[in-house]
Amino acid sequence: MPNIVLVGAQWGDEGKGRVVDLIADKVDVVTRYQGGSNAGHTIVINGETIVLHHIPSGILRQGRLSVIGNGVVVDPGVLLEEIERLRSAGYVVHEENLKLSDRAHVVMPYHKEIDLAREDAMGGTRIGTTGRGIGPVYEDKIARRGIKISDLIDRGTLEKRLRSSLEERNLYLTRVLDRNPIDFEAVFAEYLEYGEKLRPFVTDTTKLLNDLISQRKSILFEGAQGVLLDVDFGTYPYVTSSNSGSGGACTGTGVGPTNIDHVFGVAKAYTTRVGEGPFPSELSGELGLKLREWGGEYGSTTGRPRRCGWFDSVGVKYSARINGISGLALTKLDVLSSFDEIKVCVGYLCDGEMISDFPSNSEVLKRCTPVYEEMDGWKEDLSVVREPSDLPIQAMAYIEKIEETTGVPVNIVSIGASRERVVYLKELFS
Ligand code: IMP
């Protein structure tokens, strides 16, 4: 198997965890490269729902190595809880099958406090973050005052770096955000203990991954969030604070681009978004509520209701272009089964002009209205479908419309949450 990057082609929650779980069977290693506990990858196995925040979904396949790369921001308390939850569900998690980068940055309590306080203070201009401290921890990384996993497992370094970071961040919390300061001693003690618990998993994952590539092992790079939330390419400022696109796979793992063979995209058969920001094909009325209920569209990390709308080919075509996506997995096609008519957004009308390219400015995108092509629904239960030939002709026409308007072949279609509810339309990596 080649080395593959898997990205979400929309605003996150496309069902990446589920697709990773399918492909993980065919690779040796699954690595996360960005994001942190803002992600919630949901997988249903034998009727049991498992939500992963930091650990790659490959952990659910026996014999696969799971790696948390340097680009991930780790909330140690959440990660330890995740390990425990997996263990109590009967999965094997130990230092042989889970590795944590010594270069990954650590989410500290003040990051979460700042995230929440800022969102409160912003009122109507808030981003709608997950409140997990993601923006503030990446800010500290870039500002060179962050704390890395390698600092967490070294008492002297942790003390020094926490003291100087906290001094500065407490000033910000108290003077700018009008919050209480955070106590050094309590955080120091708590995080020293986390460091001790995580120590067995910590390694130089850049060396590990490159050594494995030299041994011809195959790696799946699991993106979190979606390309339209990428800090460079997404609907800025309504984005997350990392590179969720395929470029992040290199900077977030230390594997060079010459070692990556394919980029695979995951897109929902419709569109969802959590938090604020433009969303041209959003359905605000009854249809949107139906999609939310039928699709169970509530955030797996925060439980927030997701905004829902029709499939937006303009956004997915753009995602495909800037990420080099060569194939798509189309998820949750079954959710559309009850509609008489289904729409695909194929362009935008913006300031009186028809456009088919995704605007780089969110203010422009806010003014765009969708131009739709209407398709017949199939109104058939898809749960029995196993082969492409079992798909209703209207469903096939819908898939072909998506291929035509995004310019990307659809290789896999999912028609339900469990592992077997999948139809392979084309060879995955030819
Ligand atoms: P943050 O990543 O918590 O800073 O949130 C920034 C934006 O990204 C908000 O609109 C969030 O709702 C969105 N976001 C972050 N993580 C996810 C995710 O895993 N799925 C969908 N949206 C997300």
Image: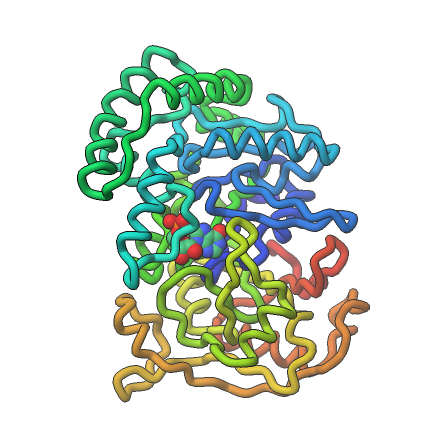
Report which quarter residue 230 is drawn in: bottom left
Q: Of residues 98 and 323, which is closer to you in this image?
A: 98
Classify 96 as above or below 283. Answer: above
Residue extending furthest toward the top: 156
Q: Is residue 246 visible?
A: no
Classify 135 as above or below 349. Answer: above
Q: Of residues 254 and 213, which is closer to you in this image?
A: 254
Classify 301 as above or below 324. Answer: above
Report which quarter residue 62 is drawn in: top right
Would residue 273 appear left or right of 82 to someone viewing this image?
left
Q: How is the image coloured?
A: rainbow
Residue 265 pos. (x, y %): 52, 58
For the N terminus, the image quarter is top right
Q: Of residues 146 and 112, which is closer to you in this image?
A: 112
Residue 287 pos. (x, y %): 56, 80
Residue at the (70%, 50%) spot, across then down: 44
Residue 239 pos. (x, y %): 35, 56
Would residue 325 appear left or right of 289 to someone viewing this image?
left
Would residue 378 appear left or right of 186 to someone viewing this image?
right
For the C terminus, the image quarter is bottom right
Would residue 229 appear left or right of 7 to someone viewing this image?
left
Residue at the (54%, 27%) spot, across then down: 99
Residue at the (48%, 68%) spot, across then down: 307
Classify 219 as above or below 230. Answer: above
Q: Is residue 264 visible?
A: yes
Residue at the (32%, 15%) spot, across then down: 159
Residue 8 pos. (x, y %): 50, 56
